[in-house]
Amino acid sequence: MSYHERNIVTYIVTGIVVMTVYTLHLQGLLEAGLLERPDAGVEIGWSVIKLIGGSIIVTIIATILITIINAIITQENDTDASDERDKQIDLLGMKVGFIAFSVIFIGIFIAMIFGLTTTMAIIAMIYAMWFSSIIESVVRLYVYRQGF
């Protein structure tokens, strides 16, 4: 597995773990009734700040650990040697991720027409961003594995 593929897999796994923890946190807020109050935006704001910080920390730590473990096991010294192909793969992944986010975003607004609350719409947008980034990473990994 190449350097780029390994980092993409690490990003996907850490993204799933972080969003699982975030979902459990949101479930606790929902069960406590904190998302039904007039100041629900404050709770969501703080939870997103925690999500961003936690996601950055977990991704950095996981990437470092995976790189160290891979270097020990394979005795290889991979470096980030990006070329034009890597840039094209990144652009393709971003394009697909943007399309996915746009479709979900429009779907959220359609759901609001049918009664989705603003609080739930904001939470859905957070998940839309996460889901589109996962789709982007999966597309990039797929293209790398196909030998584009």
Image: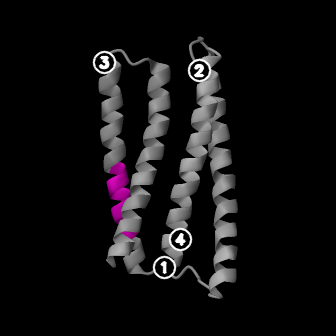
The answer to the question of whether label 3 and label 2 lie on touching residues, with beta carbons closer than 8 A, is no
Q: Which residues are magenta?
A: 88-98
At horizontal 50% and vertical 30% (from top left) the residue drawn is 123
At horizontal 65% and vertical 74% (from top left) the residue drawn is 67
- Which residue is disc 2 drawn over? 30
Q: CA distance from mark 3 to mark 2?
A: 22 Å
Query: Which secondary structure, mark 1?
Result: loop
In this orientation, which residue lies closer to the viewer: 143 or 46?
A: 143
First along the sequence among labels 4 and 2: 4
Left or right of residue 103: residue 46: right
First along the sequence among labels 1 and 2: 2
- Which residue is disc 4 drawn over? 6
Which residue type does callout 4 highlight? Arg
Above or below, 43 against 144 in this view is above
At horizontal 53% and vertical 77% (from top left) the residue drawn is 3
Where's residue 41, x and y in %?
59, 22
Give residue 143's quadrant in the image: bottom left
First along the sequence among labels 3 and 2: 2
